[in-house]
Amino acid sequence: MKKLKETLAFLGFSELETKVYLKLLHLKESTASRLGKELKIHRRTAYDVAERLVKKGLLTCIKKGRIRHYKPVLPLRILHKLREMEREIKEKREELGKVLPKIEKTLEGERIDVKVLFGRKGIETLYLDELKEGKTIHVICTTIDRTEELLKHFLPKFTKERLKKRILIRMIATRKDKKYLEKYKLLRVRHLHPRYVSPASIAIYGKKAWNNPLERRTRNNPHKEHGNC
């Protein structure tokens, strides 16, 4: 039964569909009501699952009076379904083999690199890359106060080097951050109401960009806030 369960899962049947089918193999025949009692699930749920299995070819249904009775199809039907899947996979592989050369030719010379960085060191790495790129930095920033706290030792060095390289920052920030931003040079800021600013910090420089999802303070958890800009 274990191998049969694994095969059904491989074919895309849900855990509940598998349980209903295996139970019917044991019972030989059953109504949705009895299936529900045997599996300790609601009768309507048992009925819906059984009807799906009928459509998928694993159960048959006969009416006795006004009541629907379900019977399992022999596991040989599953073997047939596996063979159908093998044939479909083979066809898709052949189709993909014909298309891939065209896709490779279209993407020739193009490359997209994606990196995932974590923590304060990850943020510092991004800032250093902005200095290395040397282009104008376009930023949507929501937590400059948190950023200054997190990078209190690194940010002054970054700012000094940025000014040395004459790198301009164009920023969209919330109005509450105005007092934190006034001291920075080579910074052009537009202040918006918080409702119009992205809940994540985003920076674009040259042909690169990074995004930092944020966890903002909430009414239920006023002490939780992470992020940077």
Image (spheres, rainbow, N blue to C red):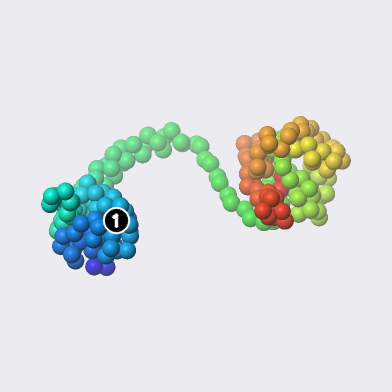
**Residue lying at the far front of the rendered structure:** 65
Location of the C terminus by quadrant is: top right
Q: Vertical placement of 211 versus 172: above or below?
A: below
Picture residue at 23% right of the left edge, 63% below the top: 23
Residue at position x 63%, y 44% from top?
Answer: 211
Q: Is residue 73 above or below residue 140?
A: below
Viewer-nearest residue: 195 or 8: 195
Vertical arrangement, residue 43 with respect to residue 108, above or below: below
Residue at 65% in and 43% down: 200
Q: Residues within 10 Å of mark 1 (few under 14, many from 20)?
A: some
Relative image position of residue 190 (x, y in whole percent): 76, 31
Q: Position of residue 24 (x, y in %)?
A: 20, 61
Image location of residue 15, percent across then percent down? 33, 59
- Pick the residue in front: 147 or 198: 198
Name which residue type carries label 1: Arg
- Residue 172, image quadrant: top right
Which residue appears farthest toward the right when viewing the image?
183
Rendered location of residue 179, percent (x, y): 85, 41
Give whichever of 49, 57 is nearer the camera: 49
- Residue beneath disc 1: 43
Q: Is residue 182 visible?
A: yes
Quadrant containing the N terminus is bottom left
Which of the pair 62/137 is nearer the observer?
Answer: 62
Q: Is residue 224 left or right of residue 91?
A: right
